[in-house]
Amino acid sequence: MKVCHIITGLDVGGAEIALSRLLSSNSNDACVISLTTIGKIGKDIESMGYEVFSLNLTVINFPVVFFRLWRNIKLYNPTIVQTWLYHADFLGGLAAKLAGVPKIIWGVRTTKLKKGSLITLIIRKLCSYLSYWVPTSIVVVAEAAKKEHIKIGYDAKKMIVIHNGFRIERTCVNKKGITNLNKLLPISENDFVIGCIGRLSQVKGQDIFIKAAGIVLKQHPYIKFLMVGRGLSNDNQFVVDLIRQHANIDNFVLADEREDISDMLQLMNIFCLPSRSEGFPNALVEAMLSGTPCVSTNAGDAQLIGGGNVPIARTNDSRDLSKKIILMIEKTNIERERIALLLQKRAISNYSISKMCDSYSKLYQKTQSDDRL
C-alpha cells in the first residue's frame, strides 16, 4: 500500500507532529507533500527516510503549484491520498481526484476558527460542499470538531474520530533536566507553580490565563505563573503590559518556545489550558502524561479527555477559570497526587501512539478493501 500525505506546511504544530508520529510507526510506503515549506517537522520526516516535497505555495503561484501537486500525485501513483488541514483537504483532495486516485482521506484538525481567518473560512465552506464528492473518509481529531463540522454541512456519514497519539515514555521524570531548569529560571523547588503551554494566540487564550492569574493572586499571592510558548517572552511588550495591567509581573515567568516541554511540565504543580477553542488539546494530554494535575476551559475535547478529573471552566471566562484553579490549589497534596495519577493512567490507556497508528491502519485497510468507497 502506498500512501501520499499532503499537508499545508511542516512547521511545528499539532497536525504536523501527529503526521510525524504516524510515519515513525508506519509500515506502508509513503511520501509527504507540503504545500508550503519543509520546516522542522519536514526535516524530521526526511531523517526517517521518507521523501518530502515542498511546493512553496503563495497566492501568486497557485496555478503552478496546483499543477505540480497533481503531477507529483500522478507520478507517485498512491493507493491512498491522505490530506491534513483545510487547505490541503481542498487543494490536495481536488488534485488527487483529478489524478484519478480513488481513495482520498481528509483530515479535520480544528473545531472553531480564530478571528480574521476569512480565507480559511471560505475554504472550509467549500470543503463542506465537496465533502460529499471528494473524500472517501474524513478523519476528525476530536468529537467536538466532528459535531461542529456536521453543523456547518460536512458529510457526517464519512467522519471517523481518531485522536492524536503521544509518546508514553514522557512519563519518566528527568530529574537532571528539572534541576537545570531551576538554575536557569527564577523558580525554586519550594515555589507553587501554575503553568500553561502554547504559542501566543487569541485562540490559545493566554490573555484569559493572565486575567485569571490576577484574580488568583488576590487570594494566593505567593503563586508563580509559568507561560511557555512562542511569543511568550520578556521581549514581548504586549504580553508584559497585559500582565502588568491584570496581575503582578514579579509572579510571572515567561519562558518562550522550548523543546524540553516534558521537563517544563514537571516544574508545574498545576497545568492550565485556557484556550478559547481547540481541535484536540495536545498540551492537556502531555500534562496528564507528566503526572500533573490539570485545569481546563471547555475547549475541544478537554472534558472528554479529562474524564471527570479535570475541573472545566467556561471558555472565554477568566473569572470562572480562576475559580477552577483555586479549587485545585486548595486541595491537599495527597488529593492532587491522586488526581495526577488517575489522569496519567487515563492518558496512557487512551492516547498512545500505538493506539493512534492502529486506528489509522484499520482505516487504511478498510479504505483499500471497500470497493463501495
Image (cartoon, rainbow, N blue to C red):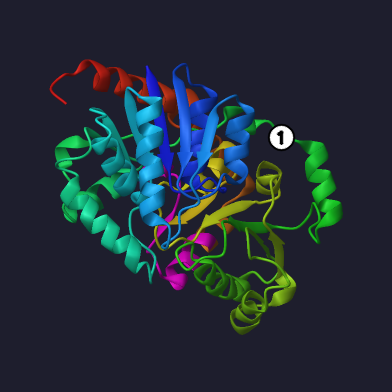
How busy is the neighbourhood of tag 1: few (under 14 within 10 Å), some, or many (20 plus)? Answer: some
Which SS class for mark 1?
loop
Q: Which residue is at a point 61% across and 76% down the rendered structure image?
A: 218
Q: Is residue 307 magenta?
A: yes
Which segment is the magenta one? Answer: 302-325
Q: Is residue 100 left or right of residue 9?
A: left
Q: Is residue 370 left or right of residue 164?
A: left
Residue 109 makes an appearance in the image = no
Point out the residue furthest to the right here. Answer: 183
Q: Residue 109, position in %: x, y?
A: 37, 47
Q: Which residue is at a point 71% across and 76% down the rendered structure image?
A: 249
Residue of label 1 = 173
Q: Which residue is at a point 54% across and 29% down the rendered structure image?
A: 51
Q: Is residue 369 left or right of residue 247?
A: left
Q: Residue 114, position in %: x, y?
A: 39, 65
Point out the residue furthest to the bottom here. Answer: 245
287 lies above or below 136: below
263 lies above or below 210: above
Q: Residue 123, position in %: x, y?
A: 28, 57
Q: Nearer the viewer, residue 327 or 157?
A: 157
Amino acid type of the residue that numbered disc 1 sits on in the rendered structure: Val
Residue 161 makes an appearance in the image = yes
Q: Residue 89, position in %: x, y?
A: 32, 45
Give residue 304's quadrant in the image.
top left
232 lies above or below 18: below
Q: Nearer the viewer, residue 36 or 330?
A: 36
